[in-house]
Every structure is written in C-alpha cells, then in structure tokens.
Amino acid sequence: MSMNRREFVHVLGLAAAAGMLPGGKVLAAGRGKSLYEVPKFGNARILHMTDCHAQLLPIYFREPNVNLGLGVSKGRPPHLVGKNLLKYYGLPEKGPIAHALTYLDFDAAAKTYGKVGGFAHMATLVKQLRAEVGESQSLLLDGGDTWQGSGTAYWTRGKDMVDACNQLGVDVMTGHWEFTYTEDEVRANIQRFKGEFVAQNINLTEDALFDDAPAYDTDTGHAFKPYTIKQMGKHRVAVIGQAFPYTPIANPRRFIPNWTFGIKDENMQALVDEVRAKEKPDAVIVISHNGMDVDLKMASRVSGIDVIFGGHTHDGVPGAVEVKNAKGITLVTNAGSNGKFLGVMDLDLGEGKVKGYRFRLLPVFSNLLEADADMSRLIADIRKPYQKDLSEKLAVADETLYRRGNFNGTFDQIICDALRTVNDAQISLSPGFRWGTTVLAGDVITMENVLDQTCITYPETYVREMTGEEIKLILEDVCDNLFNEDPYYQQGGDMVRVGGMDYTCTPGEKMGKRISDMQLDDGTAIDPKKKYKVSGWATVGSQAPGEPIWDQVAEYLRDQKHVKVKKLNTPKLKGVAGNPGIADYPGKLA
C-alpha cells in the first residue's frame, strides 16, 4: 500500500541523507527536517545533474544488480551493488535511500515510494537549494546525454531539452549523445542554450581546419570553448569541459566528421596549469562525461583539479571519492541518470584553494517535491503535438521490464525477441545502452516506453548472415570494452544483449579468451564456420537498410498483447562469484 504524503515526508526525514564529510564519513541522518533540507556549508554550492536522457516526466528506474569491477576497480565505487553498496556507505538496507540507490525489493519499493525525477520536480529542488545560498553563490552543471533518449527529443532534434534546461537554469554543460545529431543541429542547439557549452577535448580535424570549418579557436583547434570562469560571490571558479572521449567509436562519425575526440589528459594537465596561472581561480572543477572509472584514473594522473563532476556510466554514487595525485587530492563524483538524482557539493573556498567540502546525492522523489508550475507548463507545451503517438497502448507487462546491468535486462530481452520474431532470425543483437526507463509489472507498455528504450538518430534495423566466428568477435570486442582492466580502454556501456543464443563469459580473461561455449537456445553448439541469420540495430558504421527498431518492437508488442520474458539470455559467468559488483544474478555462476 502506498504511503500518504505525510508518512512519506516522515520516512524521508528519518532516512540517511547520503553525504560525506572531508574525512570520508557518512553525514549523520536527520540533520534536517527532511532529506531536502541541506544545511549550508562554505561559500559556494555546485549542483550537478547528468545523463537525464531527455526524461522530462517522472519515471521508474531500476538500478543494476550487476556492475562488475575487476583489478583495482573491484570492491570500490562505482562497482558495488545492492547490500554491498549500502554497507560500504553505512546506509540502511530498507527505506527510500536504499530504493533510490539499489535494485533491492524494487517492485514493492517502487509502488511504495513512487516515481523519481521529472524536470518540474527537479526545478523545485534546484530553486530551493539555490535560494538557500543565493543565486550568485551557486552553479548548476549538466554533464550531458541530455538531448537524447525520448520521442520528443528525437522529433525536435533536442530543442525540447535545450528549452527545458534553459528553464531549469543550467549554467554549464558538456556532451556525448548530443553529438548524434548533425554538426549544424548541435551548433544551433548550443546557440539556443542560455548557458555555456564547454569541451577541452574536442578539436577540428586537419581537413576541417584547412577548409575553414567553424571553430571556437582556430589557433588551438578547439571546436568549442574549453573552459569558463564563473564568479561565485567573492570567489572565482574555473569550469573545464570534458566531453565523451570515444564518441566517434561508440556513435556514428558520419554525423560529426569535422571533430576529433579523446581523453587527452596531457592537454587537460596543460589547460589546468594555464588556467591556474592565468585566471587565478579559487577552485578548478571539471564537468566530465568520461565515465567514473576514467575520471578516477584521470584524477590520479592530472593534478590541480579540485572536483570532477562525472557522468556517462549512470552510477548513482552517494559519496565523493578522494583521489590522491602529484599535488594533492581531487574529488570525483557521479550523479546517476534519468533525472533521478541531483548532486550537491558545498565548497568552502579560500584564496586560491578549497578549504573544505560537503557532498550529498539527493534522490528526486516526485511524490515529495511539488512540481514547478512554469516548468510544468513548458513540458505540457512540448509534449502536446506528440501526445497521441506517445500514449498509444501496445501491451501489458506481465513482469517488470528494465534495462541496466552488465548483461541482459528484461526490456533488452523483449527487444531481442522482437528482432528475432519480426525478422525470422536465429540470433539477435542489441546494444548495451545504459539508458531506458523501467515499466512495472501490470502496467501498460506505451509507445513512449518503447521510444525511451530505442530512440536514437540511427535506429535502422538489419538482417544479415554472420558466421559463428564473426559473432564471437563481436562479443569479444564489446566484452573487452567493458572489462579491460585499464579504464582508458573502456567506453562505458554494457555488454551487447543477445537473443536466441547463450554463451559463457569469463570477465577476468584477456581479449579473445572471454567468450566460450556459444550455443543456440536449443543447445546446439554454434559452429565458427557456419552462417547464422542475425538481426540487430544501431549500426555505427554505414547506415543499415531496415525500418526503425521502435516500429519492430511496437509490432511485436501489439501482437503479443501481454509480455513476459520466456528466456533471459544471460551468460554463464566464470571467476566472479563473490565479487561485490554482482548479486542475485539470474544466470549461472561458476
């Protein structure tokens, strides 16, 4: 039974507010009357959201039960799930905080605590937190993956999210999925954006420079402004942008042929040194879309950064990680996804340095926060032309459908099953995207839910013959991207989802040796030399010839009327039993 509003406020008031003291201890619960009463500390407040994936309305979102860390990443944030994560931070195993941060008892807890996120509810929280310290002493940062992930974002080419971020008051942002629109569309949206777009690691190609392509600085080759200086009361804060470094590998280069990307930590170090010498800031912060493991490594290699506000890997991490480097400590945070969390970092700034900090990761419960009226009107206006298409009822979910975890989620499996059924294929492949909202058991699956899972600018499906060897090469390549022990060789997604086949995965092995025992659903071994009919979507290279994936999934759901996964194609895993990044795994562990 759902709580009423008074009961809900009371429970949140007793819940542990996920914050950290400089010594690394969890901030005591109950300091304020509610979760959203954040005592003022210091003289600068940085608010951080990331990876909202165009979710304007409140949603359900199930956190992963598999987020494996290997090597130095094992047993440390963000590679902790369920009770292991809560134990690490000293948080209770039940209640709204546990629900926000973990998958534990998800179905029951979701019905109790309701939906999360929503820009109208986020706006209320942002206004409150900024008012508490004064507008001149706060900044709102957006880590990117903002313009993609919904039907309205796709149809408006991201303009809906630019307008929503303007209304929210975003001051500075960087990007990733933003670059899956064309260069002209990206530049038009940045022009429309009232804040600043920064990215030190995007440069023009030599050919683009020769052809006089648009650039922020032709001398340095920067396509965009690399950093900005913000006045916060009596203090100056430098904000450097770090866009997703592997965009042309993970997404189609054909959309943005004039730009080069990369981690470029040598350039980052040079820029930090230049900014400190030239601008004399009291703090240097980075708004990053590297992914948390890459941020942690960068923080150890690049000195002079006070805080990295990270995104891309969708990790809701309730504490700032302190990373030692040559000249001191850099704090690394990550603020989840889908508008579910807002990071709050209060800094005590002195002359040229950060003297102290307080950090909280606040879950945005739409049942608790009133919807901001102005933002609600904007959202209604954005959605009105598309409401009929978005609200089409396709089928009923007979189990909770979700995506998020290193291997197949139930909504991933629905997509794979749809590809096989519609295209009469033996095997299906679906990308390991980390975005995509959750549908509770018993709820109607609408076209909007399908678009939340599939809406990209390269949605075309394909059907082709592949040998068993080719299929193995694909699995090995993606697996190395996910489990390579060097974060700089990771791209931050999850394992490619499969339908119609099973396999064994040994994450701790080296490239080429992680995938074995491939077989069809009926147990027949997959022959390396034999050809199989394979269907998939979202090709990064040349454009595929088929219809958009959402049309095929919708067709499948309309025919099914009620859906429940018959078989979840999760691999047998070797060598990870006892890893704190895995719990309640639905497959076999060896």
Image (cartoon, rainbow, N blue to C red):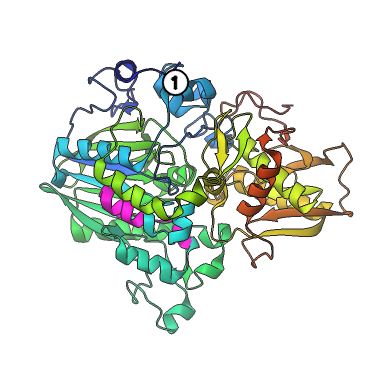
Q: Nearer the viewer, residue 32 or 11?
A: 11
The image position of residue 248, as x and y in percent, is 54, 63
Kindly identify the residue that appears in the image at 22 percent across and 21 percent down: 32
Measured along the vertical axis of the image, is residue 397 above or below residue 464?
above
Measured along the vertical axis of the image, is residue 309 above or below residue 367?
below
Mark 1 crowd level (few <14, some 14–19, many ≥20, 10 Å Cα): some
Whether residue 162 appears in magenta in the rendering, the answer is: yes
Q: Amino acid at mark 1?
A: Thr
Measured along the vertical axis of the image, is residue 535 above or below residue 499?
below
The C terminus appears in which quarter of the rendering?
Answer: top right
Q: Nearer the viewer, residue 96 or 121?
A: 121
Residue 510 visible in this rendered orientation of the protein: no
Whether residue 250 appears in magenta in the rendering, the answer is: no
Query: Hey, which quadrant is residue 514 in on the image?
Result: top right
Number of marks present in the image shown: 1
Q: What residue is shown with label 1? A: 112
Measured along the vertical axis of the image, is residue 574 above or below residue 471?
above
The image position of residue 216, as x and y in percent, is 32, 71
Q: Nearer the viewer, residue 328 or 214?
A: 214
The image position of residue 66, as x and y in percent, is 59, 32
The N terminus appears in which quarter of the rendering?
Answer: top left
Q: Under tag 1, what secondary structure? A: helix
Residue 335 visible in this rendered orientation of the protein: yes
Q: Residue furthest left?
A: 234
Left or right, 217 with respect to 533, comes to: left
Q: Residue furthest front?
A: 388
Q: Nearer the viewer, residue 299 or 288?
A: 288
Q: Which region of the structure is painted magenta?
A: 161-179
Kindly identify the residue that appears in the image at 46 percent across and 45 percent down: 297
